[in-house]
Each structure stands twice: as structure tokens, then as C-alpha cells.
Image: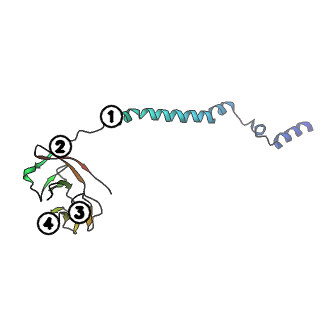
């Protein structure tokens, strides 16, 4: 009997972890929850996710995601002389916009609702700036960035195209920065 007790004491006093844990290990759990199984699952999931995004990568590389832009007629170029502006609505009938034909002959278009409190923005011909009269907000005509007053964000840019003497709105860019 003392030999049996002595053997148990030696077993528990041993510093070898495998001896102390051999009764707690289930072979099924050891095979199911080991590092190799985890790594196989992780690598498999990574490969599956990578392969699932491959069609989108190919389409982006080939340029298939370029959308066909719908051109919306704004005005005839002859109806907007240099140093003048006209108003129109884009992209919806509820979104006021402003087309400016600068003194230098460039065409610029922006949504004309001030980014501060949505007051209308007007073209000031003498100083070639966009003015919001509500709170004396000024925007740079060349890029729509605020230059004075309370507005902190630039006006949304409307991309324009001229084809056969007609000015079209081709898209809108809401920029930050």
C-alpha cells in the first residue's frame, strides 16, 4: 500500500507536464483542436475569400465598372457669354446649380446651395467669385473651396462636357478637402 501511495506522490510531484496531464487529454479533442487544424482552416478561409474577390478584381482591371454617364443638357454655349452665369437643376429638379462662363472662357459648374446653411450662391462677375449673400460666404470660382465667411466645405462640383456647342452636365463630385 505504501508503494501505491508513493507512486501517486511521485507522479504529482513530477515536473513533466505530459505525466500530469495525460488523464485530462481526449484524443478526439486533441486531433480536432490543435494548431495544425486551426492553420488549415485559417489558410482555407483566406484562399476562399481571395478567390471569391477575383472576378471583381478582373472586372476592375479591365475597366468594366465604368458607368455610362447620362448627359443632361444645361444650355447652348452661345446662350452663356463670357463673364456670365445661368442657373439649372442637377442631378435632380430639387438641386439648384450654377454654370459660370468665366472671363477667361472656362466653364465651371457647382451646386449652388451654400454648404453653410443652404442659401443660394451667386456669381459675382467683378471679382470672379461665388457669393452667398446670407452670411457673406465667398467661394473660389476655380475649385469651389470657401475663401471667406462661415462656410467650411467646398461646393459640390458638377462635371461638364461640351458637345456640338451644347453644354451638358455629366456627373457630380462631392469632395472633402
Mark 3 Cα within 10 Å, few/some/many (few <14, many 20+)? many
Mark 4 Cα within 10 Å, few/some/many (few <14, many 20+)? few
Which is more N-terminal, label 1 or label 3?
A: 1
Q: Secondary structure at mark 1?
A: helix
Q: Of discs 4 and 3, which sits in the foreground?
A: 4
Give the CA distance from mark 3 to mark 1.
38 Å
Which is more N-terminal, label 2 or label 4?
A: 2
The residue drawn where x is 66% and y is 33% is 30
The answer to whether residue 1 is seen in the rendering is: no
Q: Of discs 1 and 2, which sits in the foreground?
A: 1
In this rendered view, identify the residue nearer to me: 111 or 145: 145
Which numbered tag is attached to residue 32? none
Which is more N-terminal, label 3 or label 2?
A: 2
Give the CA distance from mark 4 to mark 2.
31 Å
Q: Secondary structure at mark 4?
A: loop
Percent from the top left, x then y, of residue 155? 25, 57
Which is more N-terminal, label 2 or label 1?
A: 1
Residue 134 sits above or below residue 63 on the image = below
Task: Give the left or right position of residue 62, taking residue 111 as reference.
Answer: right
Which numbered tag is attached to residue 62? 1
In this rendered view, identify the residue nearer to me: 152 or 106: 106
Percent from the top left, x then y, of residue 40? 57, 32
- Number of numbered discs overlaid on the protein picture: 4
Which is more N-terminal, label 1 or label 4?
A: 1
Judging by the rendered image, the residue that carries numbered circle 4 is: 126
Judging by the rendered image, the residue that carries numbered circle 2 is: 71
Judging by the rendered image, the residue that carries numbered circle 3 is: 139
Amino acid at each position: 500500500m505504501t508503494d501505491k501511495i508513493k507512486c501517486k506522490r511521485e507522479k504529482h510531484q513530477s515536473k513533466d507536464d505530459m505525466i500530469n496531464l495525460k488523464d485530462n487529454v481526449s484524443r478526439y479533442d486533441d486531433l480536432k483542436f490543435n494548431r495544425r487544424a486551426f492553420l488549415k482552416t485559417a489558410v482555407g478561409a483566406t484562399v476562399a475569400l481571395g478567390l471569391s474577390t477575383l472576378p471583381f478584381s478582373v472586372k476592375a482591371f479591365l475597366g468594366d465598372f465604368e458607368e455610362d454617364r447620362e448627359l443632361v443638357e444645361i444650355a447652348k454655349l452661345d446662350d452663356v457669354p463670357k463673364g456670365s452665369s445661368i442657373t439649372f437643376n442637377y442631378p435632380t429638379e430639387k438641386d439648384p446649380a450654377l454654370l459660370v462662363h468665366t472671363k477667361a472662357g472656362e466653364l465651371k459648374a457647382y451646386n449652388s446651395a451654400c454648404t453653410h446653411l443652404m442659401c443660394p450662391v451667386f456669381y459675382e462677375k467683378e471679382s470672379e467669385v461665388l457669393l452667398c449673400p446670407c452670411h457673406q460666404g465667398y467661394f473660389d470660382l476655380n475649385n469651389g473651396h470657401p475663401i471667406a465667411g462661415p462656410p467650411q466645405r467646398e461646393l459640390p462640383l458638377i462635371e461638364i462636357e461640351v458637345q456640338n456647342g451644347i453644354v451638358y452636365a455629366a456627373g457630380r463630385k462631392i469632395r472633402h478637402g
